[in-house]
Amino acid sequence: MTDQEIIILRTEAGEKAVLAATMAKENFNFEFDVAVVGAGPAGIMAAAEASKGGLKVILIEKNIAPGKKLLLTGNGKCNLTNAEFNLKELVKNYNNGEFLFHAFSVFGPKETIYFFEQLGIKTKTIKDKKVFPVSEDAEEVLESLLKYLKKNKVKTILNSEIVDVVKKGKKIDKIILKDGQIKAEKYIFCTGGKSYPSTGSDGLGYKLAKKLGHTIVMPAPALSAIEIKEKLVKNLQGISLKNVKIKIIQAGKEKFCETGEIIFTHIGVSGPAILNISGKVENLLKNGEVKICFDLYSLLNQEEFLKKIEYIFSRYSKKTLKNTLSDFMPERLAEVLLDVGGIDKNKIANSLSKSEKLKIVKSIKNFEMIVGSVLGFDHALVTRGGVSLKEIDHKTMKSKIIDNLFFAGEIIDIDGKTGGFNLQMCWSTGYIAGKNIVIKK
């Protein structure tokens, strides 16, 4: 066995050296106390905690470098967690969040912030309680984690793809890689989901878990942009709006709503508020057409907004409608909304009838479009679905089916809203799995 302690990560900014322990792996056959599959956030945390407990740990990664997806989080700035310290409120930000209550009570946002500060990563909390490193550098975060692995003597094998898992009775006997095999007393699967497959999240973990007897809740893209059927959306590309109330309607009934920031794209709409509802929209589409209704001025109700419009039109009575509306919204948006309302955009403001004013108000506060689709795994930030929670012990992350298997991270059937929640789930479940695999030795 040989150690290589420097891996060069090549980025757009250039080359940056980060520490990692790797092993020569030609035709190898090694035995460990714990084998952790997947060197993402959950896997790194799980491996380090297991090793701290005195176990001989191997961390297996299919990519040529660890933490590939971590480098993309927060647009490269790494939204580490969310400073929602009320655990009852925290779990509300997740699909199946109640499962995480114990994990968060042991290692939640406070513990995560402290953990990274102990690693030398100073943090800052910004809007919506999002927590970032002060440096806003995901590479710095990854480097600190790799140093943490080295400090805790975790052996890491990279560029190693799993091709099979062998079970004997109710235990995993070994995992087969292209270049050899690994045997361990215990295993932790942290293989991620199916989102961003270019980072290595290709759903392999689901196949392995299913072969071992686990139930897989059908994976679907989550935190993804939404495609709109109407072609007019292309005219809105790049327009970003805050405090937009979004109502999702199916068969004439409002299914749910969300308020936040949106951004129009060349084929639809994205932004934090859209990402957060995309998973639910995906589920609704299975049952038929879905409409999305935007209240683009949600701070005022319809009557209040009508008064505002009337005041603006009286103040700028000689301006055209397009120019008047563009005083408080992007001109391209004003033109589209007037076209939707069937009102001449070049009409003079003081010439409008009461009914025309009401049409304008309606077009702004009830801007309705038809959903085409939710963009797939190539565009989704996370995966909804995964290993059934009914088959995992929420206090330990141990499988209820395989005696020497634990799970952590995106592979399990939990996903959160945007804003640091999904990374927090990885840190927490990875920590719990790593700690309890020591206890359960």
Image (cartoon, rainbow, N blue to C red):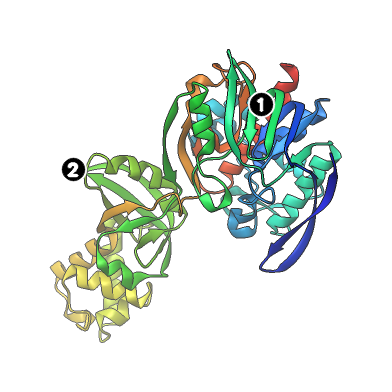
Which amino acid type is marked by label 2? Ala
Residue 229: x and y, percent? Answer: 25, 60
Local secondary structure at mark 1: strand
Residue at the (18%, 43%) spot, across then down: 251
Q: Using the numbered discs, state the Cα–Cα distance from disc 2 to disc 1 in whole angstroms.
A: 47 Å
Q: Can I make out residue 36 in this image? A: yes
The residue most toward the front is 27
The label nearer to you, 2 versus 1, is 1
The tag earlier along the polypeptide, 2 or 1, is 1
Q: Which residue is mark 1?
A: 187
Residue 133: image location, x then y, percent: 71, 54
Instruction: Name the mark on residue 251.
Output: 2
Relative to 273, 362 lies left or right: left
Q: How many marks?
A: 2
Of residues 221 and 303, which is closer to you in this image?
221
> Residue 253's quadrant in the figure?
top left
Q: In which quarter of the view is residue 152 placed?
A: top right
**The quadrant where residue 106 appears:** top right
Q: Is residue 48 left or right of residue 270?
A: right
Residue 245, percent across and down?
36, 53
Whether 282 is drawn above or below 438: the answer is: below
Label 2 with label 1: CB-CB less than 8 Å = no
- The location of residue 279, given as percent across then percent down, is 40, 43
Apparent side of residue 367 relative to residue 236 in the rendered image (left or right): left
**Residue 122 can be seen in this image:** no
Kind of element beneath mark 2: loop
